[in-house]
Amino acid sequence: MKHAMLTNQKLFVNLNGLPITVQGTSRRMLPLSSSDLKATSQQDDDGTPCSEQLSSVAGGIVALGKFDALHIGHRELAIQAAKAGTPFLLSFTGMAEVLGWEPRAPVVAKCDRDRVLSSWSVCCGKVVPTELEIEFSKVRNLTPPQFVEKLSKELGVRGVVAGKNYRFGYRAAGDVSELSRLCEEYGIEAYIINPVMDKKQDILDTQFTDTKERGQVSSTRVRYALSKGDMRYVSELLGRKHRLILMPNNEQLVSSKNNTIVFPNRCLLNLPPKEGIYDNCHIVFDKENVVPCRVVIDTDNIQLELVEINCINFTSVDSPYLNIEFGA
């Protein structure tokens, strides 16, 4: 039994000296001049000229936000972008390092993001949104006008989509009113949408002190639900079951006997729920190969208890990743 390896290939673009990563299903190198976005004659790995790949970014509709959890609010931004044109998600990398935040595990493992975005194609007119990532350190000092100018003149986007609480520019100086005004000035369409609201408003006052908190679905709320081990709530916020990704190897295997296998927590590539016992989980290899299990998480290890004894040999799985999906 084999499990399909998840890929996280990326397209690298240089935006006037600013490195941008385009995540998608192919890997292409687009080295650009410092003054414009003209591609060189280099072709990508599948033989497609770079100029053709570059044109797929230009003229697109870019959703703006912090796409950590890829929750239902983020999905709604992608849906609106797809209605207006070719959808892209624009976010920033390296914010924690620049701003001095404590390092923390992502909600969605990097190697799993393509799978999640692919699942959104059903809602996005059968188009898979593409991720654009810009290094935060390269743009943190841009004023709101400078940021929109980048979108217009250097990325060549046709439009942007943002939630009504979105802020941008140095020290978050710009709001959506300024975004709309600047987009009009630069000939870009601006689509401002209402946020997707969390059905659980009773936890608003007691659990969240962030001034940006208005009761909307957010990555903060997803992290809170995971910290409480409330997997039903997590699923509601994500619009899917939470998938935990491990990258084990034989040296990291703690123990394996009969229907139980144990891995150290250092194998985890994304954020697990709180310590505890979780029933109705599955080890997912692909749509046809799903193995039911119970998951036990403690301070040091994650234990998988298979429902069927000897139903799989983990050491024979031809993939670096192990996917665990939590039931609601």
Image (cartoon, grey):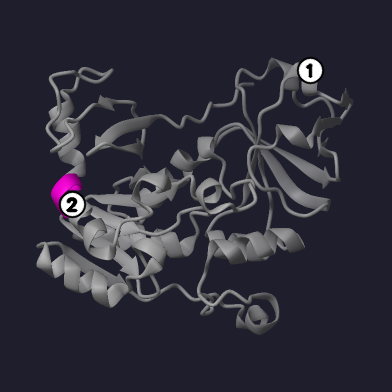
Please state if 293 lies on the left or on the right of 149 as rendered. right
Which secondary structure dominates the residues rendered in magenta? helix
- Residue 283 or residue 27, whichever sits in front: 27
Please state if 162 lies on the left or on the right of 94 as rendered. left
Which-is-in-front pick, marks 2 and 1?
Answer: 2
- Residue 139 or residue 44, whichever sits in front: 139
The secondary element bearing badge 1 is classed as helix
Q: Which mark is residue 157?
A: 2
Residue 303 x, y percent position in the rendering: 83, 38
Task: Name above or below for residue 250 compared with residue 8.
Answer: above
Q: Which residues are magenta?
A: 152-157
Task: Name above or below for residue 133 compared with residue 228.
Answer: above
- Residue 39 or residue 16, whichever sits in front: 16
Compute the Cα span from label 2 to label 1: 47 Å
Q: Label 2 neighbourhood size at 10 Å, few (<14), some (14-19), many (20+)?
A: many
Residue 89 is one of the magenta-drawn residues:
no
Quarter of the image holding residue 209?
bottom right
Residue 316 x, y percent position in the rendering: 70, 15
Residue 11 x, y percent position in the rendering: 32, 31
Which residue: 67% across, 79% down? 203
